[in-house]
Image (tube, rainbow, N blue to C red):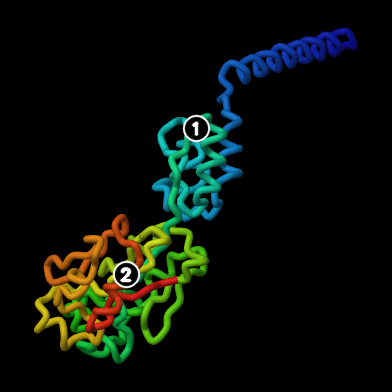
Amino acid sequence: MNTTAIIAAIAVLGGLGIVFGALISVTDKVFAVQVDERVAKVRENVAGANCGACGYPGCDAFSEAVVKGEAPVTGCTPGGAKSAEALAGIMGVVSESMEPSVARIRCQGGCGISVDRYEYTGIKSCAHAASLAGGPKVCPSACYGLGDCQKVCQFDAISFENGLCVIDPEKCTACGMCVAQCPNSLIKLLPKAASVTVRCRNTQPPKVAMPVCTYSCIACKRCEKACEYDAIHVNNFLAEIDPAKCTRCEACVAVCPKKCITVSA
């Protein structure tokens, strides 16, 4: 092959390279996926825990959903009001006021308080224990203290004392993961200001509930009669407080003979 042919071949290949490069550049521009810059801004203003409390698999998915209008700006509960306000500003919407919430444990049945049905020595899991012969506690609504809630808490807000779940309100972000994990539905998200709580979930008749736990509600209705604000009522053998009506006067706390109504931080 002479020099002229070699130069011609190189020129052809170079020309083809230029043509293909131009085609790739045009194709890239035509088919490029447009990324809304607001997604990154939203992502910067959420809690970043990837806890799933928003209902999405992670903060990235939630951020995209907010920008698409599929998720509310108040959806990041760990981020609280600060996050909601920031997201509202990014999206150009008005954010509804987000009252700070906290997870509350509605049980006091720790070791020596709630009667054991049997000694549980199986897998350290409340869900597993609940599936065996009615659970290790005689009370059907007792805390088993095996840590399922603690395992899913990414904020180090849950510990255990005397076999009972303890939630630190200062660390709790109200993500709700522990609520979903408790097999006996003992944990509930409540307004942080709602510090007066009925810490019992046993709906058995008083004669049955009284012997199984020191702090069981016996449906005596003394709390109901003492409340001047119609904030507490006994239904299905269990006292329930309406946080919207409760003024935290603590009249119910004072008259409860079983001390199952407490005041939390």
Residue 256 percent location from the top left of the image? 24, 79
The secondary structure type at the circle numbered 2 is strand
Marking on residue 174: none
Residue type at mark 1 is Val
Task: Give me the residue at 25% from left, 69% from top.
Answer: 184
**Residue 25 vertical placement versus 74 (above, below):** above
Residue at 31% x, 59% y: name it: 243
Q: Quadrant of the C terminus?
A: bottom left
Indicate whether 72 appears above or below 222.
above
Mark drawn on residue 67: 1
Between 68 and 227, the residue placed more toward the observer is 227
Residue type pointed to by label 2: Thr
The residue that mark 2 highlights is: 197
Side of 61 relative to 133 (left or right): right
Residue 74 lies in what quarter of the image? Answer: top left
- Helix, strand or loop for disc 1: helix
Q: Tell me if 235 is positioned left or right of 80 in this view.
A: left
Q: Quadrant of the N terminus?
A: top right
Which mark's residue is nearer the viewer, 1 or 2? 2
